[in-house]
Image (cartoon, helix red, strand yellow):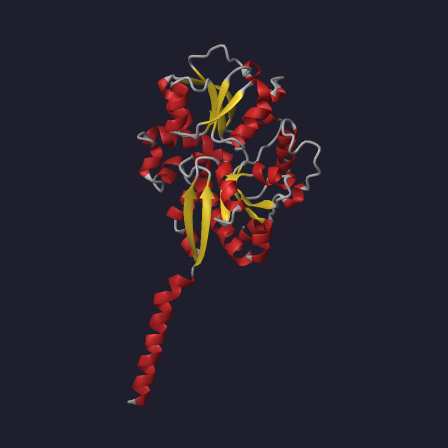
Amino acid sequence: MRKKSVLLSGIAALAVIAGTSSAFAEKITIMVGGVEKQIYLPAKLAESLGYFKDEGLEVELLSEPAGVDAEDELLAGAVQAVVGFYDHCVDLQAKGKFVESIVQLSQAPGEVELVSAKHPEIKSPADFKGKSLGVTGLGSSTNFLTQYLAVKQGVKLGEFTSVPVGAGNTFIAALQQDAIQAGMTTEPTISRLLSTGEAKILIDMRTKELTKAALGGTYPAASLYMESGWVEKHKEATQKLANAFVKTLKFIDTHSADEIADKMPKEYFAGNRDMYVKALASGKAMFTADGVMPDDGPATVLAVLSGFSKNVKGKSIDLTKTYTTEFVKAAN
């Protein structure tokens, strides 16, 4: 009887452990600068594929319309990680704050500067003078790139207006209402406006080659970035996140746009799955296959930011502290 009692108590203990194992899953909150954007697709895809759970992580994905808002949430300690543009890592170091790209998701911005069909006079960024230009948010990566393109063509920062209009429906409405005459956005917003003829492409940065033509080099963009201090104290959790994202990038690299779309929420298609798939098919080459930072990327980002930003220009930036390959190399 005693043996049976011990056996039963042992089984009960195992049942409690098994039943509460999920409670021991590490909780990580990631803020995405627009979770429905194709440039940030790896975040939702990793969740859909179950890769976070496979690593023993309980990941909550939150969404802000602009990367700058996501950055603010990270610095406030409200989230542990951000899926946003790497250029924030460089910009923040100039302000004395250290964040680093843990997984480099893309090697091109995936952004396009669109011009309203109502304004054929805008033929290059040199024509931005006096215009209102749409960006996701003030201080966002779209704002950074817009300012660089304007200044590069001789237009001063005070000679045009950056208007924060987000993406998707809000961007489209701003263009339709002539609140902006041009603007920078991503898929699927790009394809939606091109299909109706309401906008045309001025500058395309959806591929590595087109980006080099526009910005002078490889421009690593979408990344998983975190505060350096947090990473140092949570290396195991950081490695698990890197493992999940690297597996996701390998999935993207080895599967068709149609197969990837099957794993995404239908509401991300904005009512047109075929258009979403077509855009992804032509744009998925922007993603890295392994999460490793391109060797020539950080220097291009620094050169772009130094081209217009008083915050960065002339500052001593240690690019080696803006990213790490430690975790992605271990994941690979």
Can I make out residue 114 in this image?
no
- Identified at 51% across, 56% down, the residue is 237
- The picture quadrant where one finds residue 235 is bottom right
Q: Position of residue 7 (x, y in %)?
A: 33, 82
Left or right of residue 209: residue 38: left
Q: Position of residue 225 (x, y in %)?
A: 54, 45
Left or right of residue 92: residue 287: left
Residue 102, placed above or below residue 184: below
Residue 12, placed above or below residue 52: below
- The picture quadrant where one finds residue 94 is top right
Residue 282, placed above or below residue 320: above
Count of residue discs: 0
- The picture quadrant where one finds residue 103 is top right
Q: Quadrant of the N terminus?
A: bottom left
- Identified at 46% across, 17% down, the residue is 181
Residue occupying the far left of the picture: 1
Q: Position of residue 98 (x, y in %)?
A: 61, 46
- Identified at 58% across, 15% down, the residue is 126
Q: Position of residue 137 (x, y in %)?
A: 49, 31
Say which of 238 and 71 sits in front. 71
Say which of 75 and 253 sits in front. 75
Residue occupying the far top of the picture: 121
Can I make out residue 54 in this image?
yes
